[in-house]
Image: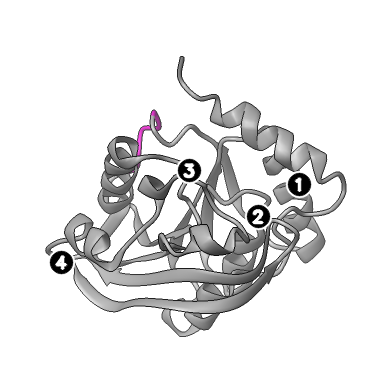
């Protein structure tokens, strides 16, 4: 029986009540990349949950599309966008079955999207790569296997976690502008809080 991602995530977001499970501030890695985003850029935020990253991208003047499987999260994301007075094109989508747009975005962003194992990750990464325009950017942050020692967020399955070598293979042929494993104390709502073992990737698609 396949895992029901929608039911799992909807329950987590519903249990948070009026609070935002991962907060309303943008991810620190993403906000540190502000210089890579310009007004009018088309950006896809993948599995963006309650909207903290897509709303921030819209505040930078980008034309933002955000996907999310949970209708509970999407309702909260739309509420956040209204409160911040920005427009985001929110789409309810199962990314493993979604008809990914081809070469449609100047940048694709995936922040903590480690909800799939190796086989499904290939499908997810292939869709993300296909959606980036030639010469465009892909930005990804996730947890490394050391995160299992900290247990401050992320999956409990080691095969879902990223290493630098895994990402080099997955994005072979792309220019790695940044690829860094590091540890940091993060505070993203009650969903991500405490010391974490992180990996960041900024890669450019061949023109």
Q: Earlier in the sequence, mark 3 or mark 1?
A: 1
Q: Are marks 2 and 3 in contact (CB under 8 Å)?
A: no
The label nearer to you, 2 versus 3, is 3
Way the structure is coloured:
one colour
First to last magenta residue range: 97-101
SS category of the residue bearing label 3: loop
User: Dot 3, crowdedness within 10 Å: few (<14), some or many (≥20)?
Assistant: some
Q: Earlier in the sequence, mark 3 or mark 4?
A: 3
Q: Which residue is mark 3?
A: 115
Q: Of the residues tagged 3 and 1, which is closer to the observer?
A: 3
User: Going from the N terminus, do you reach mark 4 or mark 1 first?
Assistant: 1
At x 76%, y 63%, the residue is: 85
Disc 4 to disc 1, C-alpha distance: 36 Å
- Kindly identify which residue carries mark 2: 51
For the residue pair 21 and 77, the one nearer the viewer reads as 21
Gap in angstroms between the C-alphas marked 2 and 4: 29 Å
* Quadrant including the C terminus: bottom left
Q: Is residue 54 above or below residue 182?
A: above
Looking at the image, do the residues carrying marks 3 and 1 touch, with CB atoms under 8 Å apart?
A: no
Q: Are marks 2 and 1 in contact (CB under 8 Å)?
A: yes
Percent x, y of residue 23? 74, 62
Is residue 74 positioned above or below 175 on the image? above
């Amino acid at each position: 029986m396949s895992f029901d991602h929608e039911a799992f995530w909807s329950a987590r977001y519903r249990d948070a009540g009026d609070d935002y499970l991962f907060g309303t501030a943008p991810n620190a890695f993403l906000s540190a990349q502000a210089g890579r985003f310009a007004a009018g850029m088309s950006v896809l935020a993948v599995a963006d949950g309650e909207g903290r990253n897509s709303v921030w991208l819209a505040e930078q003047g980008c034309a933002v599309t955000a996907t999310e499987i949970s209708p509970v999260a999407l309702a909260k994301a739309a509420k956040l966008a209204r409160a911040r007075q920005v427009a985001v094109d929110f789409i309810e989508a199962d990314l493993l079955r979604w008809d990914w747009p081809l070469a449609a975005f100047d940048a694709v962003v995936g922040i903590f999207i480690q909800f799939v194992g190796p086989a499904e990750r290939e499908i997810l990464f292939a869709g993300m790569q296909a959606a980036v325009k030639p010469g465009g950017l892909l930005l990804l942050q996730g947890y490394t296997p050391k995160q299992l020692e900290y247990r401050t967020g992320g999956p409990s399955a080691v095969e879902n976690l990223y290493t630098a070598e895994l990402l080099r293979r997955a994005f072979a042929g792309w220019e790695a502008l940044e690829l860094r494993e590091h540890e940091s104390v993060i505070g993203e709502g009650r969903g991500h809080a405490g010391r974490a073992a992180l990996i960041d990737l900024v890669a450019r698609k061949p023109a």
